């Protein structure tokens, strides 16, 4: 057999002009030069790799990847060509291909340390830690470099994290033995290497061994003694060495009385001591009291010692005599913005007839002679007053008036603040709005919501960067169906990076029901950018952690990567995008098929395993909860959505979209998918979702039998479901719910229509089975005409809803008549846009089904 010809490479002088063009971002010019050079050397691998790289940067991704594979099949061995191919593959997250690229080269050049490093990092990107362990061990044996030894240990640990219990035990034991050997051979020279050792001990619950390691001479690699002490306290606490921890924590507090971690450790272990040695606990109590008194003297300006006293009394005492301590804390720190949050957990211990005397006592600490400090104290006092609630609607209304008056009086004090700073009296506005929301939650009268909106908008006019005001407004505008204002406010939040995952739910959830398709789609697509960034950037962060031996960061990066990859918000966005695209493209079969063909079905999996693996990263700390009953601001506006309800929604729309995809792209029916859809349907309680899933499941069954010739006509059942879908009804307390109902009904007809068109395209025109589809078309036309009438009625009801402010509203002191007129005009404009969009879709549907075939 003839020998394989060796790879051909262009000379450096031929590729330097191309590289210069690439470096300056002139990819068209670089591609032209490469094409010209390839005419002379058509098989030069480095030129072909350059061409693929330029094509990729110019948007010809498929052609670039195909050309990369051609070059890869020729087994290139030079670093330049390999890196070019690797860059293209990495840009498209094809990390397995990068591994396949380097494996044969490393095998043929085992002593090339640089290539071995490239392969190792490629394996890290795939998170194949068994392979990284094997390779790192070979590199350590061959190149005798200590870092490769610790790469091996880290790889063992990372395998153990994801392993079954027995395998985990074995892997951790092996990792521990390797670290023991490194200790004996004095290879552990950095704090990061010591932390790796401690992490392995912790993973095996060997907390005392970790504590002993820190107290040994090896612990001295931790150069910051305070960090070393805190680590020791952590492991001793985990090993329930209560007396030792109380002594160590006391020492830390004597150095820094404001060390809250030390405060918590001290009290936790004091309580732990009570469980194991009551005598020792009784002896320690007086020392604790003395410590608190001494800390309050030595660190009198710090909050820590005074919070420690509150914790001590509430956890170890009976909690009944906290009032004087709370009053002392308020008198000392009442002007701090954090004061209310500090006291929040203890206020529940004051109840009944003690509340009013307590409030009266606190009120005596408000005035200090300094207007600004008095203002700040009044804010915290008002929050405490709001926390305990109001006995009557009159009391609540009076409180709202007081908050508006207090805000108005605070305005002069805020003169001179930077535009980016919050006004000093902003929290008065928030308290007034929250009080109105409490009233709205009981009555669901939307003019009360308008009143809350008006005072928040007035506050936002002066405090343009107050995110709490914006978040409350976003939720309220969503309830009113004011899509344009939602988009404007969401844009002003300037959401970036991880915030797309953690706070987008506040303004993006259910936005597709009320917003124009283009607006909602742009928000969903923008929100998805964090997930592609995660796929691209987090593996590179992992690589940097290995390179620079920051082993403690590696588990954090992996957890971060996993939390975004399996984010619940990502799954939500994927379904929302599909729902909008279906409505936008339903009348263009070619465009619709392209969309479904390119759909990433992994994001739509809706079986129990897939849904249970989703991570809820939503930031709930932004949701104000200042009331004793624990009901948050968002719950006052739109109620509380349980995790079960969210998973039901994800399950329904995941199944619907996947089944619809099978129908549209005309693939073989997936029986397991169909079965899981039926199972999911029985678990879902929303009527609209039941109807939608039932119809799509039946259409999927019918589509699967068309080609077999044994057509299962489901048209009668589907027509019955369409007829039984009920009549639309308005929801005065939540206008967006009315709009959501309208959207859901239109969506149902659109989805059934798409399936009808796909099935019709799969049949011969003379096929007798066409009759069932013809009947379905007629049913769509009838349902569409009926729905048009119902939607017009619903939106007429919306327009007649009273949204004007009450005549006696104190909010009128903050806004003028022009603002109210503009507000009402914008609301009605949003509703008209939504109505127009829905009716336009229905008109197109009816026209398509009315055409004679």
Image (spheres, rainbow, N blue to C red):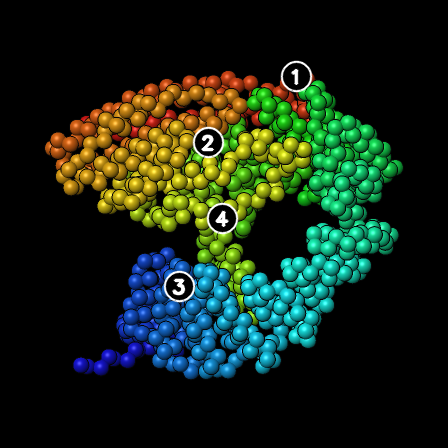
> Residue 620 lies in what quarter of the image?
top right
* Residue in front for this viewpoint, 212 or 528: 212
Q: Are marks 3 and 1 in contact (CB under 8 Å)?
A: no
Marks 3, 1: nearer the viewer: 3
Q: Label 3 vs label 1: CA separation?
A: 65 Å
> Residue 741 lies in what quarter of the image?
top left
* Residue in front for this viewpoint, 681 or 26: 681
Q: Label 1 vs label 2: CA separation?
A: 30 Å
At horizontal 29% and vertical 73% (from top left) the residue drawn is 74
Q: Is residue 13 visible?
A: no
Residue 95's tag is: 3
In this rendering, would 697 be left or right of 58? left
Q: Label 3 vs label 4: CA separation?
A: 24 Å
Disc 3 secondary structure class: helix
Marks 4, 2: nearer the viewer: 4
Q: Position of residue 439 (x, y in %)?
A: 63, 24
> Residue 640 lies in what quarter of the image?
top right
* Residue denoted by label 1: 807
Q: Residues within 10 Å of mark 1 (few under 14, many from 20)?
A: few
* Residue denoted by label 2: 514
State which tag comes first along the sequence, 3 or 4: 3
In this rendering, would 464 be left or right of 351? left
* Residue in front for this viewpoint, 272 or 201: 272
Q: Is residue 252 above or below residue 465?
A: below
State which tag comes first along the sequence, 4 or 2: 2
Q: Position of residue 317 (x, y in %)?
A: 77, 43
């Amino acid at each position: 057999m003839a020998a394989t010809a060796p790879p051909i490479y262009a000379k450096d002088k031929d590729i330097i002009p191309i590289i210069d063009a690439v470096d300056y971002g002139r990819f068209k010019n670089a591609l032209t030069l490469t094409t010209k050079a390839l005419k002379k050397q058509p098989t030069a691998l480095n030129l072909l790799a350059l061409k693929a790289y330029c094509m990729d940067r110019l948007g010809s991704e498929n052609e670039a990847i195909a050309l990369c594979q051609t070059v890869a099949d020729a087994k290139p061995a030079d670093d330049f060509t390999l890196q070019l191919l690797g860059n293209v593959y990495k840009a498209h997250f094809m990390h397995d291909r990068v591994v396949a690229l380097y494996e044969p080269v490393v095998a043929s050049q085992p002593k090339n340390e640089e290539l071995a490093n490239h392969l190792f990092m490629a394996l890290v990107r795939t998170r194949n830690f068994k392979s990284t362990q094997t390779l790192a061990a070979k590199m350590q044996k061959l190149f005798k470099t200590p870092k490769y030894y610790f790469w091996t240990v880290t790889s063992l640990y990372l395998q153990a994290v994801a392993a079954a219990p027995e395998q985990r035990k074995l892997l951790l034991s092996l990792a521990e033995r390797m670290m023991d050997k490194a200790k004996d051979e004095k290879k552990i020279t950095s704090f990061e290497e010591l932390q790796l050792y401690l992490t392995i001990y912790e993973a095996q619950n060997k907390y005392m061994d970790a504590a002993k390691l820190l107290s040994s001479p090896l612990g001295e690699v931790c150069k910051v003694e305070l960090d070393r002490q805190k680590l020791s306290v952590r492991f001793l606490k985990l090993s329930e060495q209560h007396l030792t921890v109380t002594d160590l924590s006391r020492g830390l507090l004597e150095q820094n009385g404001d060390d809250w971690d030390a405060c918590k450790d001290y009290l936790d272990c004091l309580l732990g001591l009570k469980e194991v040695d009551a005598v020792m606990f009784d002896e320690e109590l007086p020392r604790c009291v003395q410590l608190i008194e001494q800390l309050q003297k030595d660190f009198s300006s710090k909050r820590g010692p005074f919070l420690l006293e509150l914790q001590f009394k509430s956890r170890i005492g009976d909690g009944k005599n906290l009032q004087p301590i709370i009053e002392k804390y308020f008198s000392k720190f009442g002007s701090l913005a954090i004061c209310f949050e500090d006291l929040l957990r203890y206020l529940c211990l004051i109840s009944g007839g003690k509340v009013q005397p307590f409030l009266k006592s606190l009120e005596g600490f408000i005035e200090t002679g300094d207007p600004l400090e008095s203002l700040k104290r009044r804010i915290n006092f008002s929050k405490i007053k709001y926390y305990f609630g109001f006995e009557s609607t009159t009391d609540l209304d009076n409180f709202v008036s007081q908050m508006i008056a207090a805000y108005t009086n605070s305005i002069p004090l805020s003169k001179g603040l930077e535009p980016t700073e919050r006004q000093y009296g902003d929290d008065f506005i928030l308290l007034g709005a929250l009080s109105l929301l409490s009233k709205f939650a009981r009555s669901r009268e939307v003019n009360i919501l308008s009143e809350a909106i008006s005072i928040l908008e007035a506050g936002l006019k002066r405090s343009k960067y107050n995110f709490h005001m914006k978040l409350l407004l976003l939720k309220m505008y969503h309830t009113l169906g004011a899509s344009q204002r939602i988009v404007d406010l969401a844009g002003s939040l300037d959401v970036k990076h991880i915030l797309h995952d953690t706070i987008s739910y506040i303004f993006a959830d259910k936005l597709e029901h009320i917003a124009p398709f283009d607006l909602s789609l742009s928000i969903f697509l923008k929100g998805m950018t964090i997930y592609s960034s995660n796929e691209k950037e987090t593996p590179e962060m992992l690589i940097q952690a290995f390179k620079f031996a920051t082993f403690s960061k590696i588990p954090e990066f992996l957890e971060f990567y996993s939390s975004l990859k399996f984010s619940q918000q990502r799954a939500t966005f994927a379904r929302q995008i599909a729902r909008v695209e279906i409505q936008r493209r339903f009348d263009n079969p070619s465009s619709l098929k392209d969309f479904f063909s390119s759909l990433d079905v992994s994001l739509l999996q809706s079986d129990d395993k897939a849904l249970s693996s989703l991570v809820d990263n939503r930031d709930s700390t932004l949701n104000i909860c200042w009331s004793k009953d624990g009901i948050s601001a968002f719950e006052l506006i739109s109620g509380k959505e349980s995790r079960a309800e969210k998973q039901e929604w994800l399950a329904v729309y995941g199944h619907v979209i996947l089944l619809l995809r099978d129908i549209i792209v005309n693939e073989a029916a997936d029986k397991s998918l169909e079965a899981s859809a039926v199972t999911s349907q029985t678990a879902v309680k929303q009527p609209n979702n039941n109807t939608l899933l039932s119809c799509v499941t039946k259409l999927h069954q019918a589509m699967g039998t068309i080609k077999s010739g044994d057509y299962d006509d489901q048209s009668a059942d589907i027509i019955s479901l369409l007829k039984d879908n009920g009549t639309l009804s308005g929801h005065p307390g939540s206008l967006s719910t009315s709009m959501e109902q309208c959207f859901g009904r239109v969506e149902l007809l659109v989805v059934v229509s798409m399936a009808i068109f796909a099935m019709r395209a799969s049949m011969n025109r003379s096929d007798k089975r066409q009759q069932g589809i013809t009947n379905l078309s007629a049913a769509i036309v009838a349902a569409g005409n009926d729905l048009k009438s119902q939607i017009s009625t619903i939106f007429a009801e919306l327009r007649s809803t009273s949204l004007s402010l009450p005549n006696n509203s104190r909010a009128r002191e903050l806004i003028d008549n022009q603002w109210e007129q503009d507000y009402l005009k914008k609301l009605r404009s949003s509703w008209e846009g939504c109505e127009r969009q829905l009716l336009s879709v229905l008109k197109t549907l009816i026209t398509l089904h009315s055409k004679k075939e």
